Amino acid sequence: MKKIINDPKNVVDEMLKGIVAAHPNHVKRLEGFEVLVRAQGPTDKVALVSGGGSGHEPSHGGFVGKGMLDGAVAGAVFTSPTPDQVYEAVKAVDGGKGVLLVIKNYTGDVMNFEIAAEMAEADGIKVEKVVVNDDVAVEDSTWTTGRRGIAGTLFVHKIAGAKAEAGGSLDEVKAVAEKVITNVRSMGMALSPCTVPAAGKPSFTLAENEVEIGMGIHGEPGTHRETLKTANEIVDHLLQKIFDDISLAADDEVAVMVNGLGGTPTMELYVANLRVSEVMKEKGIKIAKTYVGNYMTSLEMAGFSISVIKLDAELKELLLAEANTPALVQ
Amino acid sequence: MSKTLFGMIQALQETISSQEAFLTELDGAIGDADHGINMNRGFEAVITKFTEEDTDIGASLKKLGMTLLSTVGGASGPLYGTAFMRAGAEAQGKETLTLEEAEVMLAAAIKGIQDRGKAVKGEKTMLDAMMPAQDALKQAVAEGLSVVEGLEKACAAANEGIEFTKTIRATKGRASYLGDRSIGHQDPGATSFTLMLETATKYLKA
């Protein structure tokens, strides 16, 4: 294992301190907890709290700030945060209008956030939850835990965050978050595995020239392995899986995210994005906004995901609204 | 050597610590490769909170469960945390247990896991070791076996449960995303439960 760390046990704590050191105007540490909250808070609006295992930076702490999250809870690497941490975040950010928890669909995340919600509700705080499940690589059936939440979560943070900033009620913010979840789809692929610092070795291996299609953001296996193809072929396949799952027609408007998994050169992400834009153009689908970069990573994994959200007037307006966070300013 | 609750918790911690890499490896095959790491972090925290003064089984298991809940994370934190707390609630004020009481506690733990995780038997989860173990305890009680004899039967049943998890596909938890690719691998949660049950049994037998 080759990593720029001091001690695997201190990675999350030192990462959070490093974010605060870099962005003191945006975020501060909730003392004694693995939680980042807005530097100026709580605010007089509905608050959003998200989080999950660490190793996905800049998610989620990088998106705490105006127009997006109010608090982000960082678990151990690839491990859901514990209920007490989430509970403290909820208490810290509640400004009296209630708190929306944005949860990615993993068994552990859902249970830990649910327990935290029960604890906060017992204190009289209004809490609502949404569960993001945008990954079309895995089956959504009674035979699985349901689809995983991956990079499409960023659209929930952005759009629901804008709704809260605009003064939406807890029910309204939740409703728009649900609307995002209904309209966003993602799928990724990996060229190489990643190593959890505490484990010290990769959780799987890929042969030279072998890739995993549909890989999850914790190194969970995807749909299948195949030999590396061209960027255009890969993008066509991922987009086809997305189009198979959400109906998009000419003149529909979308936003796109080409998300790096941590070890992918930005150059390659732009190469992939070119093909995404070409395919959309061929189909007559309008792209209202494109994000290219590392938003929801998987440590040093090489690979990327594509997320597509179908927009209506409300979603578009909220997506294009102002955001001012460490990892996204627009 | 006299048997104490603290001694048993120490034995559990030693087992989890020595099996950390094994449990993580099992999880790596079908999940996200953190089960051993997370359980070890939890029991490292647990051991700092107990001394020989902790003799109330109910209060101690509640404390143990709360500690796991706030340190383990992932899915095993809420599940084991809930399991130990529910088991503890059945043993308030008790310093010793009969086999019958142990069976009632295991039943309460299983109910807690089902409430929290919404799983049933046969979904390739820790329940596939816990439920056969409980059935074995129930039968041992009916047959009038000793505590150690009964626990040994439960261990055997739990191990059969682990073998069973190798033959089925996961439909709960992260392993469910693998579909048929999860077949052939044993469930890490069923394994960690069985390791703890075996440790407790060996401690009482020694």
Image (tube, coloured by chain):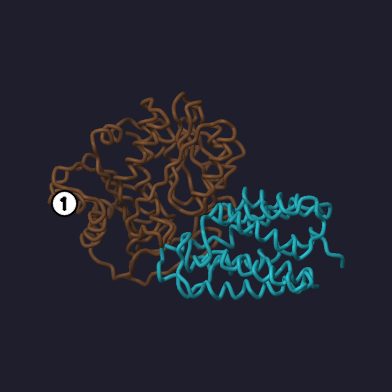
Chain colours: A brown, B cyan
Q: Quadrant of the N terminus of chain B?
A: bottom right
On the image, the x and y values in percent for residue A134 come to 35, 51
The residue that appears at 66% across and 48% down in the rendered structure is: B66
Q: Is residue B89 left or right of residue A114?
A: right
Q: Quadrant of residue A165?
A: top left
* Above or below, comparing residue B94 to residue A326 in the picture: below
In-front residue for pair B40/B4: B4
- Identify the residue under disc 1: A278
On the image, the x and y values in percent for residue A141 come to 37, 59
In-front residue for pair A290/B111: B111
On the image, the x and y values in percent for residue A265 come to 32, 54
Q: Few, some or many C-alpha atoms within 10 Å of disc 1 (few <14, some 14-19, many ≥20)?
A: few
In-front residue for pair B71/A174: A174
- Label 1 is found on which chain of the structure? A
The residue that appears at 55% across and 65% down in the rendered structure is: B24
On the image, the x and y values in percent for residue B149 come to 76, 74
Q: Quadrant of the C terminus of chain B?
A: bottom right
**Which residue of the protein is positioned furthest toward the right in this rendering?**
B1
Q: Quadrant of residue B169?
A: bottom left
The residue that appears at 66% across and 75% down in the rendered structure is: B156
